[in-house]
Amino acid sequence: MWSNRPHLVAGNLTLGASDTMVRGGASRPNVAGASYLTISLCAAAARSRPQPPRGRGLIDGILAIVTARGTGSLRSLRATSPRPEREAAAPLADGVRSTGAGSPVGLLPATRGGFPTAPMRDLLTRTMPGQDATAAVTPARTAWSRNLATPLREFMRTEAGGAAILVSATVLALVWVNVDAGSYESVWRTHVALRVGGFGVNLSLRQVVNDGLMTLFFFVVGLEARREFDMGELRQRRRIALPLLAGIGGMAVPVAIYLAINAGHASSHGWGAAMSTDTAIALGLLALLGPRIPGRLRSFMLTVVVIDDIVALVVISTVYASHTTVVPLVWAAALLACILIVRAARIRNGLVFGVLATALWVALLKSGTDPVVTGLVIGLLISAYPPSRPDLERASSLFRRFREQPTPELARSARAGLESALSPNERLQHLYHPWTSYVIVPVFALANAGIVIDRSSLANGLASRITLGIAIGYVVGKPVGVLGASWLITRLSGGRVRPPVGWATVAAGGAVAGVGFTVALLVATLAFSGAGLEQAKLGVLCAAVLASTLTWLVFRATSMLPSQLRIRAVLGTAETIVDLQAPVDEDRDHVRGPSNAPVTLIEYGDFQCPYCGQAESVIRELLADFGELEYIWRHLPLTDVHPSAQIAAEAAEAASAQGAFWEMHALLLRHQDALRPPDLRRYAEQLGLEGDRFSDELRTHVYAGRIAEDVDSADLSGVAGTPTFFINGRRHHGAYDIATLAAAVRTARARAVLAR
């Protein structure tokens, strides 16, 4: 009635052999001499569903044997409300437990000083009377949850580091060209040729960077955009319209400003340099702001900048193409058709796609069309999807076979099984994203950002229509375009389509979109030369500095608004995507806390899962800190790796029938190493339950159907591992330590207050 499923959690796959013993969330070998193994999976696949994990793309390490021990204590919980299964939240803060295992190399104690104290973060915490913004955390709590990261959050973290390196490369280019302009130009004009017989390409080093390496940058942008369309905020297609039109508005207004300033002059043909946002720097600035901005702004802005990039590449390939040769263009079309056919045939050989994509790039180069469009097109064609249950079970089986017979052949099959469980989109992002953020984009800046800065050049540049058109277009036009288009669509739709965040946050997103560095420089090198190119570069640099400053000012001004107005301005009133497919049933579900609470936290858990045991202390602390929080437990026994999980879940239901679910729940999580039927009967006796009835219900599996219903609801909601949390119907991705969950609960509460 239920199915076997792999226990893929934030780091470990624990084999459920009969000779394995688990205590308090940590595992140890049976002293009788039987073997023990905890196989460490460096993939967090099941912790991030429905979005696959970012930072473990190719599933880095295969095995790490862990033999750590942990202890813990958890006091029994007694029902305090008229309904036996409902328990008041306030008395639950005592008995915090600590463990010593959970990561591939064991867990180290970590202290946390609470939440960051940035102004925009305070906008939520200050709205909760009696709530401490820096909730105390026990020093003994382990740091296991900090290893978790959602795809988008890790993407942003990489962009933040890449933005810092990009700024450094820009400064280095400016210093280099102002110290020795001759060597700067001679290096980047060095020619590189690659020939096979009579066929080949001959490019300058700058062209290799601009046309070759930047293709990989746009490839990663395409991959991330496709992931958002398949699994992110934009999987509901009606949500695409607003960021799409906001992106178009954010390009149209800057171009109009540039053309107005340069009307009647030859420089007007450079309008393309004033339209596109720099994806790396814009997202990097958002990542640097960290917890001060809502997460949905990142998704919104990612869509906006991807629209920017697509339109910019179309403009580059058409308006600024130096010449067009028909025959190579026909070959390019034929090669693209071949790629689509191979994709439709579900051929997953990376070498085939690589050869075809390279041939497409060469054909576009020979045709006179900018070949960087190849990267974006190929990236958008690679779909993203969560791992299926059969793929996860196959990966688990392959690991067991490798453990039994550790041969090179089985090692290769185990790795192949793990890789195939993740989508190609996930694996390729993990492979190329660090390279593009930390190497390719900074090298592009080094090759293109160098301009001579002296009194004469500054005077000429600041008086130049090119410089003013680009700078004003970005700094004024981008915020006006993004904010204005969003407002217009909201008004025309009668509020049915609105931004996923508040208007102040949209304004900040428009301001940060005014950083038009990478693509702007790329267009400038095609549209201008000589003094015009230098003036265009100066305009791009000025716009980047001014737009960054404007973004900070918008956030700063927002933080100074009155409390309720500030929350509305930042979070907005748009409805969120509901990931939970089975709604809460007060008469069926196991509930702690008031039923009319503004925030509902649902956990899918497994009584033998060590991470569920560790998360229990976090839940207890949340219930103690938040009086208006409803907590619900649903069963997800992972029976192929936790052989006692199913019988333990049935024991909890048998105890529930006698009004003692939460008391049994506490005992089961406290004694995860002792979940055999005799142990369960002992717990029932300890709780004063009717022993014969309890034993009969366990023996006849009376509640197996009830647990199967929870498992089915988990399948419908895309849950594949434990613990998995939902907050007000929205899946919680990433860490589930007290600080992270408390911040998510506060945000959900603020949204619930706005919705009233």
Image: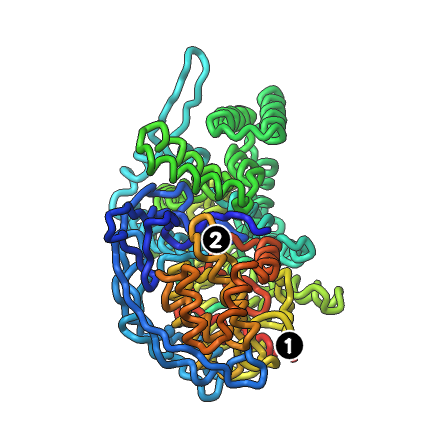
Residue 3 horizontal/vertical position (percent): 55, 48
Residue 635 horizontal/vertical position (percent): 53, 62
The mark nearer the N terminus, 1 or 2, is 2
Q: Which residue is mark 2?
A: 638
Whether residue 737 appears in this view of the structure is yes
Q: 408 above or below 526?
A: above
10 Å crowding of disc 2: few (<14), some (14-19), many (20+): many
Of the pair 112 and 270, the residue shown nearer to us: 112
Residue at image coords 59%, 66%: 729
Q: Which residue is mark 1?
A: 755
Of the pair 562 and 365, the residue shown nearer to us: 562
Whether residue 529 appears in this view of the structure is no
Of the pair 732 and 411, the residue shown nearer to us: 411
- Look at label 2 and name its amino acid: Leu
Residue at image coords 44%, 56%: 644
- Look at label 1 and name its amino acid: Ala
Q: Is residue 57 left or right of residue 384?
A: left
Q: What kind of colouring is applied to the model shown? A: rainbow
Disc 1 versus disc 2: distance between alpha carbons?
37 Å
